[in-house]
Image (spheres, rainbow, N blue to C red):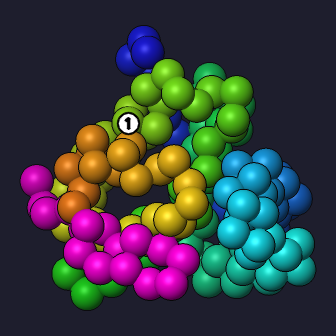
Amino acid sequence: MPSAAFTFRPAAESDFPYILDLSIRTMREHLERIGRYDPDRRRTRMRAHLDAGSLHLIGRDGAKIGCVGLKPRGEAVELHSFFLEPALQGRGLGAAVFAALRARHPGAWWIEVLKQSPARPFWERQGFVLTGEQPFDWIMERAAD
């Protein structure tokens, strides 16, 4: 993937429809596979993240290409709600966005990865290791740079 600068800005109320739609388009298939897709739960979860101020829009060349949630978790940064436009996935975009995030936050990272999603190998390639598990999620951590 060619090098491109990314913009990150706090999500606004007007971004909520996009964020909710993007989260459904990226997660629905994986959540349905385990019988956990619930549109009301998805809306409530994304609303809580927006209201907490932890969501950021990812942009490139003036277009919205995804969102990411970041919040402190002890000495680490918790990464949640990392959603990229499906048409842009599989071409190195996620790794490039995460590299840009790491440049801003060089400390340790923490993430929950849905067990039935294909994301775990991606996060392992980004330096995360499995440190625990919950009924539906893997807990993964990455040491500081």
Quadrant in which residue 98 is drawn: top left
Tally of marks = 1
| Residue at left offset 24%, top offset 57% | 128
Residue 14 appears in view: yes
Local secondary structure at mark 1: helix
In the image as oriented, which residue stretches furthest toward the top? 2
Magenta-colored stretch includes residue 140: yes
Disc 1 target residue: 95
| Residue at left offset 53%, top offset 66% | 114
Left or right of 26, for residue 137: left
Q: Nearer the viewer, residue 54 or 92?
A: 92
| Residue at left offset 84%, top offset 54% | 21
Residue 145 sits above or below residue 73 on the image: above
Spot occupied by residue 56 in the image (x, y as percentages of width and height): 58, 58
Magenta-colored stretch includes residue 7: no
Instruction: Count neighbours of disc 1 (C-alpha within 10 A) and say few if under 14, some if 14 to 19, many if 20 or more.
Output: some
Predominant SS along the magenta part: strand
Residue 109 sits above or below residue 89 on the image: below
Residue 70 appears in view: no
Spot occupied by residue 9 in the image (x, y as percentages of width and height): 57, 53
The quarter of the rendered structure image containing the N terminus is: top left
| Residue at left offset 20%, top offset 81% | 75
Left or right of 88, for residue 135: left
Residue segment shown in magenta = 130-145
Residue 14 sits above or below residue 36 on the image: above
Q: Amino acid at mark 1?
A: Ala
